[in-house]
């Protein structure tokens, strides 16, 4: 475990108010928040979207299996907690590449008696290894629909078009009736000056997030049946009644849910 280098999962934990992070993670988070003061608002909106989308899959769409890649450090209302609250027999496999997540997940990611929760350490950039992992095969039945959760993780795949083949490989392994839930950081709502600044941070290695446009994000759902309201900022995907919707420039996260026909 490298405590001297910021890791996205631990930085995200810091933005969400958690304590499972190191000085390097906090410094990275503080620098990005200084340059983009609403980044924490976006992180919270992204987390709330995960919970609403999981509730939709379990309570409305009848999904009982979930593959959550890039899960991050466990906090309140993880995917399995939301899913098993509505469908106790739900089975969940979490995937992350941070060893700190591994050690904490083993202690905190407990399951309902009727369902099952498992964790494996692997990298999104190697979908074949994830799909072939014994833990996944022992926990999920890939002949039955799966909810594929790619929440705030695809933007760590750098380069134009880099996310699409990874998503395609994962979806190809899942049967009809499966769902893709994804969120992705974007610069679409920033001013030209903010967009230029962010690109400079990426080029200098001061940010590890590769933002994508709405069109490139929407293309990840090509061939899927988009669930209403389609591709929208995370805070605008089926918000709970009475929820205050922030300005889109405060969120900077696209979200969508699609069903594999």
Image: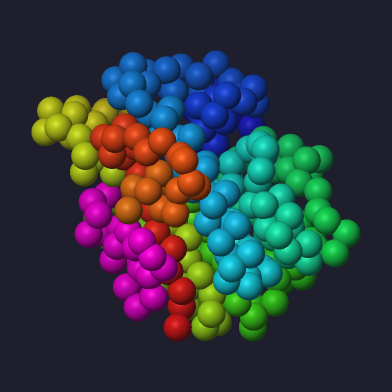
Q: Residue at x 29, y 35 (%)?
A: 247
| Quarter of the figure with residue 116 | bottom right
| Residue 145 appears in the rendering | yes
Tell whether position 219 is magenta. Answer: yes
Q: Residue at x 65, y 46 (%)?
A: 78
Q: Position of residue 244 (x, y in %)?
A: 41, 36
The answer to whether 125 appears left or right of 78 in the picture is left
Q: Position of residue 98 (x, y in %)?
A: 60, 40
Tell whether position 216 is magenta. Answer: yes
| Quadrant location of the N terminus in the rendered image | top right
Which sits in the foreground, 140 or 247? 247
Q: Position of residue 28 (x, y in %)?
A: 43, 22
Range covered by the magenta-colored residues: 207-231
Q: Position of residue 183 (x, y in %)?
A: 41, 51
The answer to whether 192 appears left or right of 234 in the picture is left
| Residue 185 appears in the rendering | no
| Quarter of the figure with residue 13 | top right
The answer to whether 86 appears left or right of 165 in the picture is right
* Furthest residue in direction right, as rendered: 113
| Quadrant location of the C terminus in the rendered image | bottom left
| Quarter of the figure with residue 199 | top left
């Amino acid at each position: 475990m490298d405590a001297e280098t910021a890791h996205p999962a631990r930085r995200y934990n810091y933005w969400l108010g958690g304590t499972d992070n190191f000085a390097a993670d906090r410094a990275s988070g503080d620098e990005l928040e200084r340059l983009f003061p609403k980044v924490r608002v976006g992180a919270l909106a992204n987390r709330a979207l995960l919970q609403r989308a999981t509730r939709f899959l379990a309570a409305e769409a009848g999904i009982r299996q979930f593959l959550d890649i890039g899960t991050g450090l466990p906090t309140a209302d993880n995917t399995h907690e939301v899913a098993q609250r509505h469908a106790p027999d739900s089975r969940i496999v979490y995937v992350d590449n941070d060893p700190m997540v591994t050690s904490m997940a083993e202690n905190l990611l407990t399951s309902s008696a009727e369902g099952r929760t498992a964790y494996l350490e692997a990298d999104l950039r190697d979908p074949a290894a994830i799909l072939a992992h014994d833990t996944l095969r022992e926990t999920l039945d890939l002949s039955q629909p799966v909810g594929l959760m790619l929440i705030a993780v695809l933007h760590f795949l750098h380069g134009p078009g880099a996310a699409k083949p990874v998503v395609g490989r994962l979806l190809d392994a899942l049967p009809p009736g499966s769902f893709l839930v994804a969120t992705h950081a974007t610069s679409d709502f920033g001013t030209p000056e903010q967009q230029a600044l962010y690109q400079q941070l990426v080029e200098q290695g001061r940010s590890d997030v590769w933002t994508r446009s709405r069109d490139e994000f929407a293309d990840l759902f090509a061939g899927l049946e988009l669930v209403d309201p389609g591709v929208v900022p995370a805070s605008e995907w089926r918000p709970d009644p009475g929820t205050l919707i922030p300005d889109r420039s405060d969120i900077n996260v696209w979200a969508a849910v699609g069903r594999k026909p």
